[in-house]
């Protein structure tokens, strides 16, 4: 089954304790992205990656790191989490970013990771 | 700056009534347009998209949307609401072929029996 998986689905942690949220897709997609969803703010992009070893900042990258060493995986790293990073996080992937009418337009989303930082 | 505006953070309709969720964007160049739906405790899934061609786009679950360039709008409609349509709906826009999607802030749809 084609899918984007995220782990963990729920995480409660404390300020300053490093954590990693994993994201993996089995569709051979080049493009992957991380979003955070907060009430009243919609989805805001954190980082994205056009391909292996190519990453770029989104709208709200501060406090986050990513890496793309393999095509299928795109982990999100919080080196020193703070309470303002409490949020619902989504990973997404697509064939390619260009939206020229091809099948690669659609982004497939993972089920989300609900993170609470105390 | 390029932006996406969804009018109304919460829309409530009666079962069987028309659903209309509004989306406007700011761009001088026709963008690529998407509607996503998020059911409770789930990720987002694509409802429909407009890239080129016919401006009236049909999606899943009876939804459709019309791209109106002159109004810079891409409103989502469904003739008759069903209880299962209760969810959050996001309009998203790609302003050019190599830029990330920009999402609206979402509209929560409630359906009243």
Image: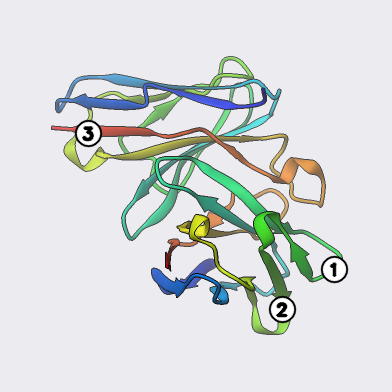
Q: Nearer the viewer, residue A64 or A115?
A: A115
CA distance for labels 3 and 2: 41 Å
**Cα–Cα gap, marks 1 and 3:** 44 Å
Q: Chain of mark 1?
A: B
Say which element carries label 3: strand
| Residue B5 vertical position relative to residue B48 in the rendered view, above or below | below
Residue B83: give x, y in percent of width and height.
49, 60
| Badge 2 and badge 1 both on one subunit | yes
The residue beneath circle 3 is A116
Q: Residue at x 24, y 39 (%)?
A: A86
Quarter assignment of residue B51: bottom right
Residue shown at 51% from the left, 33% from the top:
A110
Q: Local crowd at mark 1 within 10 Å, few (<14), some, or many (≥20)?
A: few
Chain of the residue where label 3 is placed in the rendered structure: A
Residue A64 screen position, x and y as percent: 35, 32
* Image position, residue B50 (x, y; %): 74, 61
Q: Is residue B97 left or right of residue B108?
A: right
Left or right relative to A19: residue B41: right
Q: Residue furthest right?
A: B53
Q: Which mark is residue B84?
A: none
CB atoms of marks 3 and 2 within 8 Å: no
- Kindly identify the residue that appears in the image at 60 percent across and 15 percent down: A70
Query: Which comes before the other along the chain, label 2 or label 1?
Result: 1
* Distance Cα–Cα, label 2 vs label 1: 11 Å
What residue sits right under mark 1 in the picture?
Answer: B54
**Few, some or many residues within 10 Å of mark 2 (<14, 14–19, 20+):** some
From this view, report whether residue A2 is shown above or below residue A98: above
Residue B73 percent location from the top left of the image:
63, 76
Secondary element at tag 2 = strand
Q: Can you identify the residue that label 2 sits on? A: B68
Q: How is the image coloured?
A: rainbow
Mark 2 chain? B
């Amino acid at each position: 089954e084609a899918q984007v998986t995220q782990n963990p689905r729920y995480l409660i942690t404390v300020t300053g304790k490093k954590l990693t949220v994993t994201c993996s897709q089995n569709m051979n997609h080049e493009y992957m992205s991380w979003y955070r969803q907060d009430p009243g703010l919609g989805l805001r992009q954190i980082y994205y990656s056009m391909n292996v070893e190519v990453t770029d900042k989104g709208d709200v990258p501060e406090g986050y790191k990513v890496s793309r060493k393999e095509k299928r995986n795109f982990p999100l790293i919080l080196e020193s989490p703070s309470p303002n990073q409490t949020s619902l996080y989504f990973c997404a992937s697509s064939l390619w970013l260009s939206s020229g009418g091809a099948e690669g337009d659609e982004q497939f989303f993972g089920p989300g990771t609900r993170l609470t930082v105390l | 700056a390029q932006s996406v505006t969804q009018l109304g953070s919460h829309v409530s309709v009666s079962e069987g009534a028309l659903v209309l969720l509004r989306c406007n964007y700011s761009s001088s160049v026709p963008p690529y347009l998407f509607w996503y739906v998020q059911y409770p405790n789930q990720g987002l899934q694509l409802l429909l998209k407009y890239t080129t061609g016919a401006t009236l786009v049909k999606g899943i679950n009876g939804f459709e949307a019309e791209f109106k360039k002159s109004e810079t709008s891409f409103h989502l409609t469904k003739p008759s609401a069903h209880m299962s349509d209760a969810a959050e709906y996001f309009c998203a826009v790609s302003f050019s072929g190599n830029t990330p999607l920009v999402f609206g802030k979402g509209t929560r749809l409630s359906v009243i029996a």
